[in-house]
Image (cartoon, helix red, strand yellow):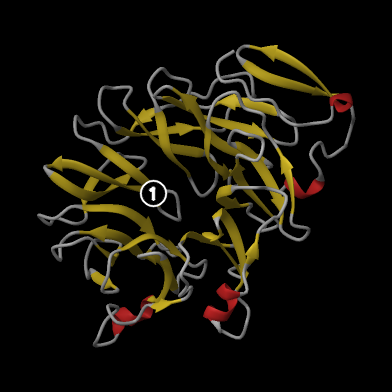
Amino acid sequence: MKGAVTVCIPRQQMAALTLGGLLLFASLTVGAALLGAYVLPNGGQISFEMGDGGHWDIYLLDVQRGIQHNLTNHPATDEDYTWSPDGRRLAFVSERDGSPDIYVIEARCADWLTPCERLRNLSNSPAEDTSPSWSPDGTALLFVSNRDTQREIYRADVHSGALLNLTHTPADERFPYWSPDGERIAFQSERSGTERLYVMQADGSAAEMIGRGFGRAAVWSPDGQNLLFVQASDLFLVDVSCADVPDGCRFAPRNITLSTFEDWYADWSPDGRYLLFHSNRSLKPHVYLADMTCADQVLTCLTAAQKLTNDLDFHLTPDWSRDGASVVLLSNDSGQMQLYAVDIAGRTAQQLTRATQPVFAPRWRPG
């Protein structure tokens, strides 16, 4: 069995069976929460990448039923994936047709023993196509392609496959992310001579530079009013309504960490109350949790942030469950990167996998 992952469940509760390349667990209890209720949000499924030696596949773990499924299962590397908002489809990058293309797969299989079908090459070009990003309504995908020599941002209609170049500049453009309302797109561009962060309308018009320095890793607040990004080794926040004022957004961002440590990669909770971010302020990289409801004193909120959990020695790449009660992340606390679920209220961690190959990019499946 390639890339076996076992779910950390009490032995007396589960009996393991191997069938068709999957690791299937038959529950010996009825109605019991196998890993504790706090790791079972709606859907209860976590995706991740796993592989070694230059080959990666995308897996799905059903926490409640204890079943692991290889969603892509191909000799080519499948990576850089993202779920559609309804959780029914998966977009990812693969070279299975000779060059990096954007593929869309139907992930709502009839059962867990049947491989997912209805795979489609959406971008289908000899060029390099990467960085897929779903529109909030699930009808379109953004991606980056160098089919016109330099990297441009394209919009693809998921149903018809029709493509539209949104940027049309001689500069490299990359890393597009849709705003929650689908009206704007954040992206990085070299159109000013050096790479900067921009926001444009969904049709590619009215591009506005955000900040005066090199901004990256942009993430929208759930209400779409603010954009959070990394500049140097600090987190910056900008109200995107600044695009409507004369001075624009170049002078509007606020440094909300302002520390001597390296702070990077942030993500809002679904309700916008909490902010997770990486920092080495404990000498090793850890995930920190900041409560952002402190009378708009954002810098104070970030200064008071605490490590998400003291149970783990090292943790990275968190992703919120859709109800905001849990976070899935990676930790090498056991000697190799494994998946853990963390209860936000109790700050306790539960190991979910004991993988024999490297595991990366954990994400809760929507729905």
Residue at 27 percent across and 38 percent down: it is 129
Q: Where 48 falls versus 150 (above or below)?
A: above
Return the residue nearer the eye: 203 or 326: 326
Q: Residues within 10 Å of mark 1 (few under 14, many from 20)?
A: many
* x, y percent for residue 201: 29, 66
Three-letter amino acid code of the residue under disc 1 = Ser
Give the side of residue 295 with respect to residue 39, left or right: left
Query: How far across and down, in percent of the image, does residue 266 sit?
Result: 50, 61
Residue at 52 percent of width and 24 percent of height: 116
Residue closest to the eye, 95 or 300: 300
Residue position marked by numbered label 1 in the rendering: 133
Quarter of the rendering containing residue 81: top left
Q: Does 213 appear above or below 361?
A: below
151 sits left or right of 41 in the view: left
Residue 283 lies in quadrant: bottom right
Q: Position of residue 15 (x, y in %)?
A: 82, 19
- Say which residue appears at 27% left-offset and 70% top-offset: 213
Is 99 left or right of 103, judged from the image as shown? left
User: Is residue 252 shown above or below 219?
Assistant: below
